[in-house]
Image: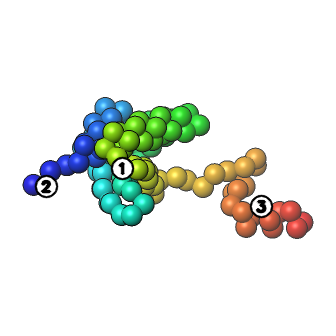
Amino acid sequence: MAKVAGDQEFLENIIKSLVDHPEDVKVERNVDEMGVLLSLRINAEDMGQVIGRQGSTARAIRALLRIVGLRNHARVNLKIEEPEGGRPPVRMDRGRSSRVDDVVEELKL
């Protein structure tokens, strides 16, 4: 089995400690000229715990990853993949969908 990079292992440990389904945590690491991209896949039920209120948990995790990257002389970014069947459509008042097309159509009326 290939050795897991320090930033990837760090992220996996943080996320697994936050979520209810640690067995579903998958981190993919890609390196290119822009730096390191860590793509995170988790169980749909755990999205709220990883994102946090108004994105505060995700921002904190990204800040920690930047620090890990600085120690290793690399730019580390985090992409949180939306799980399949993840987010239901956001609803506005009276049960209407808030998709941009729907809002534009309502404004035309």
Residue reaching furthest right?
109
Q: Which mark is residue 16?
A: none
Above or below, comparing residue 66 to residue 26 in the picture: above
User: The disc labelled 3 sits on which kind of residue?
Assistant: Val
Residue 1 placement (x, y as % from top left)? 9, 55
Residue 16 placement (x, y as % from top left)? 30, 37
Q: Which mark is residue 74?
A: 1
Residue 99 placement (x, y as % from top left)? 68, 61
User: The disc labelled 1 sits on which kind of residue?
Assistant: Ala
Residue 55's image quarter?
top right
Crowd around label 3: few <14 · some 14–19 · many ≥20 (10 Å): few
Above or below, comparing residue 40 to residue 106 in the picture: above
1 and 3 marks in contact (CB < 8 Å) = no
Residue 65 placement (x, y as % from top left)? 39, 41
Question: Could you tell me which secondary element the residue under label 3 belongs to?
Answer: helix
Q: Nearer the viewer, residue 27 or 70?
A: 70
Q: Which mark is residue 2?
A: 2
Nearest to the eye among marks 2 and 3: give it.
2
Report how far apart the C-alphas of labels 1 and 2 lie in the structure.
Answer: 20 Å
Residue reaching furthest front?
73
Q: Nearer the viewer, residue 95 or 67?
A: 67
**Is there any visible trace of residue 21 in the rendered image?**
no
54 lies left or right of 63: right
At a point 60% along the width and 55% down the height, the residue shown is 89
User: The disc labelled 2 sits on which kind of residue?
Assistant: Ala
Crowd around label 1: few <14 · some 14–19 · many ≥20 (10 Å): some
Question: Could you tell me which secondary element the residue under label 2 belongs to?
Answer: loop
At a point 39% along the width and 64% down the height, the residue shown is 33
Q: Nearer the viewer, residue 85 or 26?
A: 26
